[in-house]
Amino acid sequence: MAAAVMIERQVLEEYALEALDELRSLLVVSASLKNAAQQYQNQGVGTRIRTAQRRRWRAIQYASSTYRRTRKTLMSLGMDKNDTQLRELTRPDVHAFVVLPSNQQLGDSRKHVSWIWENLDFAARQKGGVAEYCIDAYRVHWLKSHALSLRWQEEVLLLRAEMRRTVRYFKFYEMDWTKRAAAAEAVRDNARMAYARKQAYRYTRLLEGCEDHFAGKEGVNVAELCQEVVERKHAVAR
C-alpha cells in the first residue's frame, strides 16, 4: 500500500509541476498580448487581441485550479504543506512579472516577486517564438530582481547606520545636558539646573526607547554605542 501511495505521489507531483509550467507560460503570453493591445490603435486588431487575452485568462484560471486541486490531493497523501517546490498558490501569486518599464506601477518595487517565478526552467522547454520570448523575459526578470535585492541590501545598511547615529546623538546630548546641570548646580543657579536636568532626562528616556526598539537588531548594540560616545568625549576632554 505504501508503495502505491508513493507512486501516486510521484505522478501527481509531476502533474502539479506541469500545471505550474503551463501557468507560467500562459502568464508570459498573456502579458505579451496585453503589451500588444496597448501598441495597436486598429480596432479590429485590438478586438482580436482582447479576445485572445480572454481565452488565455480562462486558461490561466484552469491551470491555477488544476495546480491547487493536485496540491490538495498531494497533501492528503502526506506531502508537507511547507514543501518548497509545490507551495500554496494564492491569488496574488498568479500574475506576470513586469518586463517593460512602461508597465511598472507605483509601488511595484516594494512588492515581493511571486514565488512561481523563482524557477524559470520552463522557458527552456518552450518551442518557437514563445521560447525566445520567455528566455528574454527571464533575463529581464533576473536583472530586475537582482537590482531590487541590491536596493534593499543598501536600504538595510542605511537603516542600521541611521539607528547607530540616533543612539550616538541621544547619548551625546544626554551627557551634554548632564554636564550643564552640574555646572549650573555648582554656581547655585537652580532654574538652569532644573531645565538642564529635565533635558538630560528627556534624552535618557529616548535612549531607553532605543534599547526597546533596537533590541536584537544586527549591528546595533545600544550599550556599546553609548560607551563609544563616552570614550570619545573623554578623549576630546583630554
Image: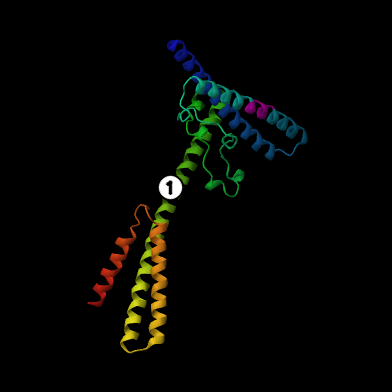
Where residue 171 sits, quadrant-wise, is bottom left
Residue at the location (48% across, 41% down)? 145
Horizontally, residue 52 falls left or right of residue 193, namely right
Q: Quadrant of the N terminus?
A: top left
- Residue, disc 1: 150
Where residue 149 sits, quadrant-wise, is top left
Question: x%, y% of residue 134?
Answer: 54, 30
Colour scheme employed for the rendering of this structure: rainbow
Q: Which residue occupies the foreground of this view, 29 or 237? A: 237
Q: Is residue 113 magenta?
A: no
Residue at the location (46% across, 13% down)? 7
Please provide the residue range marked out in magenta.
55-61
- Disc 1 marks a residue whose amino acid type is Leu
Q: Residues within 10 Å of mark 1 (few under 14, many from 20)?
A: few
Secondary element under disc 1, as helix, strand or loop, is helix
* Residue occupying the far right of the picture: 43
* Above or below: residue 175 compared with residue 55: below
Q: Is residue 60 magenta?
A: yes
Question: x%, y% of residue 202?
Answer: 42, 72
Q: Which residue occupies the foreground of this view, 197 or 35? A: 197
Question: x%, y% of residue 155?
Answer: 44, 53
* Above or below: residue 214 compared with residue 177: above
